[in-house]
Amino acid sequence: MTTQLNASFAALSDPTRRAVVEQLSRGPATVSTLAAPHAIALPTFMRHLRVLEDCGLVRSVKKGRVRTCHIEAAPLLELQGWLEWQRRIWDDRLDRLSELAETLETPDRSPP
Amino acid sequence: MTTQLNASFAALSDPTRRAVVEQLSRGPATVSTLAAPHAIALPTFMRHLRVLEDCGLVRSVKKGRVRTCHIEAAPLLELQGWLEWQRRIWDDRLDRLSELAETLETPDRSPP
């Protein structure tokens, strides 16, 4: 799981690779469609795609001479899970802090 | 924004740096407290901390000889936002696909 998170975070640290994930979120696409918007050489693009395939964010199938790619849910959900976990811990802490602040600010209204 | 996302994703691709973020989600901590669980040399640990500070995920303040770190919300929220955006596009697409599948599967029940 740690290795998967390392690889997924590293894969998404590149804007070309994030653009591929953004495009594949909209639906499967061929390699040439995916490469088209990027002003980089095809071998460089293929290296980016391989990084995404190696970490499991993208899968591809070849039919004849056409390779079609699609997104894989699990690694994205794992990233989301990790971030949400941090967020939850952190929100809980802020809630406790503001409860504490309220307790400290509220004057004692109990009868004398 | 792209540069910030690149830096945040890259920063979190390392397990030591993720552990620091996990610990700081629970509350601010001094550098020595943060370094304690990690079996690495202090200069190496400080380099990890600098990566987190450079991308804005962590901020620190020095008081006397003690440096205290805390987490910064914005970069984590930006990462979460990007992932949620992909998820939403992708869920919408799956919803449309399953609606389409239902339409195709439902036999025509209109009167003859």
Image (spheres, coloured by chain):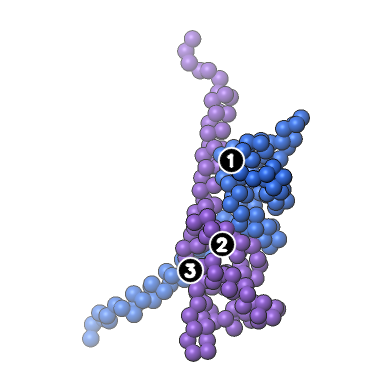
Chain colours: A purple, B blue
The quadrant where residue A32 appears: bottom right
Screen quadrant of the N terminus of chain B: bottom right
User: What label sits on residue B37 in the rendered view?
Assistant: 1
User: What label sits on residue A72 in the rendered view?
Assistant: 3
- Is disc 2 surrounded by few (<14), some (14 to 19) or many (20+) residues within 10 Å? many
The quadrant where residue B10 appears: bottom right
Residue drawn 66% across and 67% down?
Answer: A15
Chain identity of mark 1: B
Q: Residue furthest left?
A: B112
User: What label sits on residue B61 in the rendered view?
Assistant: none
User: What label sits on residue A8 in the rendered view?
Assistant: 2
Q: Residue furthest right?
A: B64
- Is disc 1 surrounded by few (<14), some (14 to 19) or many (20+) residues within 10 Å? few
Q: Position of residue B98 (x, y in %)?
A: 38, 72
- Residue under disc 3 on the same chain as residue under disc 1: no
Q: Position of residue B69 (x, y in %)?
A: 67, 39
Report how many numbered discs are placed on residues in the image.
3
Q: Position of residue A43 (x, y in %)?
A: 65, 80
